[in-house]
């Protein structure tokens, strides 16, 4: 599975249904289209400056952002499924292994 990348919406036009994302770890902008947002709610409210998380796919036209999620307070508000990988009841924390194959999630009980 492709690693997810974080960045910010640099420019976006709802009329043109596209814009640019500036990845946090790169100086190169990446095209994003309205149809590449994971949820219709995110697509309807995207504005320049929004923090986003996405995957990069390489097309003939160049790199494209896909599976885009707007982050709130630096974290995604999406729900994901997973299984408890490890927990320590005495210390009151553990890790959940995500079913989608992305990085494990730290959990404080």
Image (cartoon, rainbow, N blue to C red):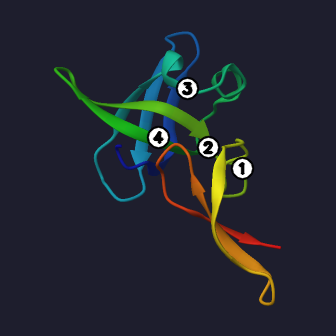
Q: CA distance from mark 4 to mark 3?
A: 9 Å
Residue at 71% across / 49% down in the picture?
72
Question: Which corner quadrant holds the C terminus?
Answer: bottom right
Q: CA distance from mark 3 to mark 2?
A: 13 Å
Residue most toward the left?
60
Looking at the picture, tell me which residue is in the foreground, 62 or 13.
62
Q: Which residue is mark 1?
A: 72
Q: Which mark is residue 54?
A: 4
Q: CA distance from mark 4 to mark 1?
A: 14 Å
Assess disc 4: are there few (<14), some (14-19) or many (≥20) residues with their C-alpha within 10 Å of its C-alpha: many
Mark 4 near mark 2, Cβ–Cβ under 8 Å?
no
Q: CA distance from mark 4 to mark 2?
A: 13 Å
Q: Which residue is mark 2?
A: 50
- Secondary structure under tag 2 reads loop
Residue 49 position by quadrant: top right
| Left or right: 85, with 66 as reference point | right
Residue at 59% across / 37% down in the picture?
69
Percent position (x, y) of residue 102? 48, 51
Percent position (x, y) of residue 11? 49, 33
Mark 4 near mark 3, Cβ–Cβ under 8 Å?
no
Q: Nearer the viewer, mark 4 or mark 2?
A: 4
Q: Earlier in the sequence, mark 1 or mark 2?
A: 2
| Left or right: 94, with 38 as reference point | right
Q: Earlier in the sequence, mark 3 or mark 2?
A: 3
Q: Earlier in the sequence, mark 4 or mark 3?
A: 3
Mark 3 near mark 2, Cβ–Cβ under 8 Å?
no
């Amino acid at each position: 599975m492709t690693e997810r990348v974080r960045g910010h919406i640099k420019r976006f036009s709802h009329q043109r249904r596209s814009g640019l994302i500036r990845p946090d770890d790169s100086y190169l902008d990446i095209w994003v289209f309205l149809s590449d947002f994971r949820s219709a709610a995110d697509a309807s409210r995207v504005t320049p400056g929004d923090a986003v998380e996405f995957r990069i796919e390489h097309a003939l036209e160049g790199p494209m952002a896909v599976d885009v999620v707007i982050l709130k307070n630096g974290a995604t508000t999406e729900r994901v499924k997973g299984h408890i990988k490890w927990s320590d009841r005495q210390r009151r924390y553990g890790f959940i292994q995500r079913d989608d194959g992305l990085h494990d999630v730290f959990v404080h009980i």
